[in-house]
Image (cartoon, rainbow, N blue to C red):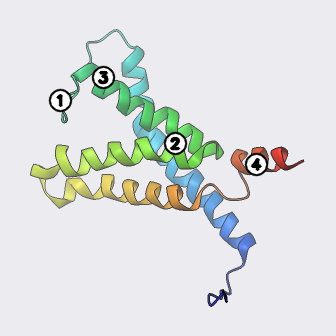
Amino acid sequence: MKNTYQTILNLRNVDLGLLIFRIAIASLMLTHGFPKLMDFFGSDEIKFGDPIGLGEQLSFSLAVFAEFVCALFILFGFLTRFAAIPIIITMAVAALIVHMPDGFGRQELPLLYMFGFILLAFTGAGKYSVDYLLQNKKKL
């Protein structure tokens, strides 16, 4: 079968762009996840919504896992495609369930995060990542 697709993309620039994007979006997500992590281990009672009926504690735990643990994985490019999935789900719930009554202004940020992490789920972390190092170590 003849390959009909051609590109003029510089793959080194694509990998550099993925690195910058991955670090930026994961760092921004950590600004939401870190305060939740502190609340999780704090002494105050956790007050968090239960948008899909899992219970407040479990919903909060899953949000902390997605917004902090998975964001850290993505920051370093470790299991990037898998780590993006919980964040995508969390942001979809935030945008399409939690903030639905609030209008687009409150939905915009979680939607931006969701689509950014969808991009990383499709592309992966790129060459400058732990995923790439582990993949090449297996080939040796």
At mark 4, the secondary structure is helix
Given this view, does label 4 or label 2 mark the residue nearer the observer?
A: 4
Instruction: Check disc 4 and report the residue beneath it.
Output: 135
Image point (70%, 72%), residue name: 13
- Tag 1: residue type? Gly
Using a 10 Å C-alpha cutoff, classify the residue at mark 3 as few (fewer than 14 neighbours), some (14 to 19) or many (20 or more). Answer: few
Please name the residue shown 65% across and 58% down the image.
19
Give how far apart the Cα atoms at labels 1 and 2 are: 23 Å
Q: Is residue 95 left or right of residue 26?
A: left
Q: Residue furthest right?
A: 140
Q: Residues within 10 Å of mark 4 (few under 14, many from 20)?
A: few
Name the residue tied to disc 1: 53
User: Is residue 35 among the parts visible in the rendering?
Assistant: yes
Q: Residues within 10 Å of mark 1 (few under 14, many from 20)?
A: few
Rendering coords of residue 44 (x, y %) = 29, 12
Whether the residues at callouts 4 and 3 have beta carbons within 8 Å, the answer is no
Q: Are marks 3 and 1 in contact (CB under 8 Å)?
A: no
Q: Residues within 10 Å of mark 2 (few under 14, many from 20)?
A: many
**Distance Cα–Cα, label 3 vs label 1:** 10 Å
Give the mark, 1 or 2, whose residue is nearer the N terminus.
1
Choose between 94 and 34: the one closer to the eye: 94
Tell me the distance, in whole angstroms, between the alpha carbons under discs 4 and 1.
39 Å
Q: Quadrant of residue 41?
A: top left
Q: Who comes first in sequence, dot 4 or dot 3?
A: 3
The disc, 4 or 2, on the residue closer to the chain's N-terminal end is 2
Q: What x and y, as percent, mark residue 56?
A: 23, 23
- The residue indicated by pointer 3 is 58
Q: Which mark is residue 83?
A: 2
Q: Spatial distance from mark 4 to mark 2, Cα to Cα? A: 17 Å
